[in-house]
Amino acid sequence: MKLKMLTIRRAENWESKAAGALTATANFEGPGGKIEVDLAPGFIVRVLALIEEDAALRVQRLASSVQSAMTDAVDTVRLIETDKPLQIEDSSPF
């Protein structure tokens, strides 16, 4: 069976389940048919913790890339500002 959809959502006030509680379902499909499984609250917390960890790592990598790009840009500007043609002094008597 293959996972087709994983849904995590917060229950609405009008729903029979505890209002505001997180609920999760996993839908699987295979040759034998379809299955929908309600997931335990502990599983929901673990999934959200993994998402939080992955998001933090992605943001750190992005920030590092931006910092590198800005450093390169500043260094390039500094090189352009200090780049002057070489002046060779001719000290020969002729």
Image: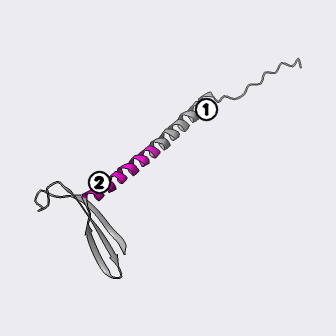
Q: Residue at x 30, y 58 (%)?
A: 43
Number of numbered discs visible in the structure rendering: 2
Q: Residue 79 bears which disc, if any?
A: 1
In which quarter of the view is residue 60 placed? Answer: top left
Q: Residue at x 50, y 37 (%)?
A: 70
The amino acid sitting under disc 1 is Leu
Q: Report the residue marked by disc 2.
A: 45
Report the span colored magenta: 41-61
The quarter of the image holding the N terminus is bottom left
Question: Against 6, is 69 above or below?
Answer: above
Q: Residue 33 bears which disc, if any?
A: none
Question: Against 67, is 85 above or below?
Answer: above
Q: Residue at x 26, y 72 (%)?
A: 36
Q: Secondary structure at mark 1?
A: helix
| Magenta-drawn stretch contains 58 | yes
Most frequent secondary structure within the magenta stretch = helix
